């Protein structure tokens, strides 16, 4: 699955991230926490600078992940 490693790493650190970075945008690359940023654009700029097209995960801490459609999930390699 796409980003499986990054998602697992985020979930493993989620409680700690919520204590220290709630509302911030965090970047994970593989199992590594790269950093926390005040807005999505700053997080994305740093991720692209460091890792090009990825893969990397950018997620806002403490905000539920919105559901995606089955067609989009299939297109990006997520289970449907």
Image (cartoon, rainbow, N blue to C red):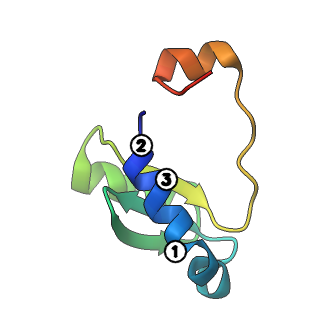
Identify which residue is drawn at 46% across, 23% down: 77
Q: Is residue 5 above or below residue 38?
A: above
Q: Earlier in the sequence, mark 2 or mark 1?
A: 2
| Up-down relation of residue 53 to residue 60 (above or below) | above
Is residue 69 shown above or below 56?
above
Crowding at label 1, few (<14), some or many (≥20) Cα neighbours within 10 Å? Answer: few
Whether residue 44 can be seen here:
no
Residue located at (55% from left, 64% from top) = 11
* Image quarter of the N terminus: top left
What x and y, as percent, mark residue 2?
Answer: 41, 35
> In the displayed structure, would residue 67 be above or below residue 65?
above
Q: Secondary structure at mark 1?
A: helix
* Label pair 3/2, CB-CB below 8 angstroms: yes
Q: Position of residue 32 (x, y in %)?
A: 32, 67
Q: Which mark is residue 2?
A: none
Identify residue for label 1.
13
10 Å neighbourhood of mark 3: few (<14), some, or many (≥20)? some
Q: Nearer the viewer, residue 57 or 51?
A: 57
Q: Nearer the viewer, residue 34 or 5?
A: 5
Residue 71 in the image, given as x and y percentages of width and height = 64, 12
Q: Which residue is mark 2?
A: 3
Q: CA distance from mark 3 to mark 2?
A: 6 Å
Disc 3 target residue: 7
Which residue occupies 75% across, 35% down?
A: 67
- CA–CA distance in space, label 2 to label 1: 16 Å
Q: Secondary structure at mark 2?
A: loop
Where residue 65 appears, as percent x and y from the top left, is: 70, 48
Q: CA distance from mark 1 to mark 3?
A: 10 Å
- Quadrant placement of the C terminus: top right
Answer with mark 1 or mark 3, whichever residue precedes in sequence: 3
């Amino acid at each position: 699955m796409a980003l499986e490693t990054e998602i697992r790493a985020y979930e493993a650190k989620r409680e700690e991230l919520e204590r220290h970075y709630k509302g911030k945008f965090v970047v994970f690359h593989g199992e590594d926490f790269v950093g926390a940023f005040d807005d999505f654009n700053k997080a994305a700029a740093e991720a692209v600078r460091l890792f090009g097209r990825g893969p990397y995960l950018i997620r806002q801490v403490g905000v539920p992940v919105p559901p995606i459609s089955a067609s989009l999930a299939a297109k990006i390699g997520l289970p449907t």
